[in-house]
Image (tube, grey):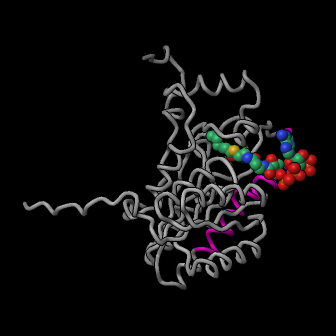
C-alpha cells in the first residue's frame, strides 16, 4: 500500500500568526508557556492578577522578538474575562487558543480547611477555567476558525492526595469540563485537552507545596526520574497539545511527571540507575 508522505516539519513556525491567551502568565509554568509560544511565532496575551509580573513576561517576550500584551484580570470575575477576550481581539484581530494555567493552591488538611479557603481555590481553578473557556470558545465559534484550549491540571485530579482536597476537586472538575466540552465543541473545530505536570521548579509551586527543605526532599523522593521538571519541559508539551501536530487529539490529558503518579512505592524498593 502506498504510504502518504508526511508534511515537512516546520517546528518553529507552527504557531506563527496565531494568538493565544495564557492565564497565570506572569510566572512559573504560565510564563514558560508564553515564552515558548512567542518563540514559536505566536502572539501572546498574558493575563493574571499582578500587572508588574505580566509586564515582566511581556518584556521577556519582546526581548526574544515576540509580540505580547499584558492584561490584568482575576479569572474569578466572568465579566472581566469576557473583557479580556475583547481586549485580545481588539489588539491582535482574533484569538486562536487559550491556556487555562491560573491556579491557587496551598496544602491544608480537609477538615481544617475553611469554607472560604475551599471557595477561593474552587473559584480560581474551576470557575476561572470555565469562565475563560466559555469566553474563548464563544469567540472561536463566532470567528468560525476553530482553535485549541489547554488546561493545566495535576495528577491528583484522579488519584487525590492528602492536603489538596480543594485543588484536587477543582482540577478534577476541569478535567470533566474538558472531556465534556471536547465532545460538544469538536464539530466547531475546537479542541480541548489537559496537561498534568508533576513537580516543577517554580517559585509559586515551591512556596505552596514544598516550602521547606524536608518537604522538597520528600517530593523529590516520590519522582522516579529523580528530579523536578524544568518549566520549559512542561511548556514543550503544552505547545504540542496546542499545535496542529495534535490536530486529532481532543478530550485527553497528557501527564508530564517523570513517572511520579505511576511510581507510588508500595512493595519492594524503587529501581535505581
Ligand atoms: C489554610 C489558607 C491558606 C493556608 C489561604 N487560606 N492560605 N488556609 N492554609 N496556607 C485561606 C484563607 O485563610 C482564607 O480563608 C481563604 O483561604 C482565602 O484566602 P485569601 O488570601 O483571602 O484569598 P486570595 O487572596 O483570593 O488568595 C487565593 C489563594 C492564594 C489561593 C489563597 O494562595 C493565591 O492566590 N495563590 C495564587 C498563587 C498560587 O497559589 N500558586 C500556586 C500554584 S501551584 P478565611 O476563612 O480565613 O477567610 C499549583 C501546582 C499544583 O497549583 C500541581 C502540583 C503537582
Q: Nearer the viewer, residue 12 or 30?
A: 12
> Does the magenta-highlighted stretch encompass residue 125?
yes
From this viewpoint, is residue 115 visible? no
From this viewpoint, is residue 134 visible? yes
Residue placed at 78% from the left, 61% from the top?
A: 51
> Does the magenta-highlighted stretch encompass residue 2?
no
Q: Position of residue 40 (x, y in %)?
A: 46, 59
Q: Position of residue 100 (x, y in %)?
A: 62, 60
Q: Is residue 9 above or below residue 256?
A: below
Residue placed at 68% from the left, 50% from the top?
A: 27
Report how many numbered discs are placed on residues in the image: 0
Q: Position of residue 62 (x, y in %)?
A: 60, 61
Q: Nearer the viewer, residue 243 or 114?
A: 243
Q: Nearer the viewer, residue 263 or 59?
A: 59
**Residue 136, image quadrant:** bottom right
Q: Is residue 100 left or right of residue 124?
A: left
Q: Is residue 268 above or below residue 54?
A: above
The quadrant of the image that shows the C terminus is top left
The quadrant of the image that shows the N terminus is bottom left
Residue at the left extreme, as displayed: 1
Q: Principal SS element in the magenta part?
A: helix
Q: Is residue 13 left or right of residue 30?
A: left
Q: Is residue 82 left or right of residue 241?
A: right
Residues rendered magenta in the picture: 112-136
Q: Is residue 168 above or below residue 249?
A: above
Residue placed at 74% from the left, 58% from the top?
A: 124
Q: Position of residue 125 (x, y in %)?
A: 70, 56
Q: Is residue 257 above or below residue 37?
A: above
Q: Nearer the viewer, residue 190 or 200?
A: 200
Residue placed at 40% from the left, 58% from the top?
A: 12
Amino acid at each position: 500500500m502506498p504510504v502518504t508522505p508526511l508534511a515537512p516539519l516546520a517546528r518553529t513556525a507552527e504557531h506563527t500568526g496565531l494568538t493565544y491567551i495564557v492565564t497565570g502568565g506572569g510566572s512559573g509554568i504560565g510564563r514558560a508557556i508564553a515564552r515558548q509560544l512567542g518563540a514559536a511565532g505566536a502572539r501572546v496575551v498574558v493575563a493574571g492578577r499582578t500587572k508588574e509580573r505580566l509586564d515582566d513576561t511581556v518584556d521577556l517576550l519582546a526581548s526574544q522578538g515576540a509580540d505580547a500584551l499584558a492584561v490584568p484580570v482575576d479569572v474569578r470575575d466572568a465579566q472581566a474575562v469576557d473583557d479580556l477576550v475583547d481586549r485580545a481581539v481588539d489588539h491582535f484581530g482574533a484569538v486562536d487558543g487559550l491556556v487555562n494555567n491560573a491556579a491557587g493552591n496551598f496544602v491544608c488538611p480537609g477538615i481544617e480547611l475553611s469554607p472560604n479557603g475551599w471557595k477561593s481555590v474552587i473559584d480560581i481553578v474551576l470557575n476561572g477555567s470555565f469562565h475563560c473557556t466559555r469566553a474563548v470558545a464563544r469567540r472561536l465559534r463566532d470567528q468560525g476558525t476553530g482553535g485549541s484550549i489547554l488546561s493545566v491540571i495535576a495528577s491528583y485530579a484522579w488519584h487525590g492526595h492528602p492536603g489538596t482536597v480543594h485543588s484536587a476537586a477543582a482540577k478534577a472538575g476541569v478535567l470533566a469540563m474538558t472531556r465534556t466540552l471536547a465532545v460538544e465543541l469538536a464539530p466547531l473545530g475546537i479542541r480541548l485537552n489537559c496537561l498534568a505536570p508533576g513537580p516543577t521548579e517554580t517559585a509559586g509551586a515551591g512556596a505552596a507545596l514544598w516550602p521547606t527543605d524536608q518537604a522538597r526532599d520528600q517530593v523529590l523522593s516520590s519522582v522516579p526520574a529523580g528530579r523536578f521538571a524544568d518549566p520549559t519541559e512542561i511548556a514543550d508539551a503544552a505547545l504540542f497539545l496546542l499545535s496542529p501536530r495534535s490536530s486529532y487529539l481532543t478530550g485527553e490529558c497528557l501527564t508530564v511527571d517523570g513517572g511520579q503518579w505511576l511510581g507510588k512505592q508500595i512493595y519492594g524498593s524503587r529501581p535505581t540507575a
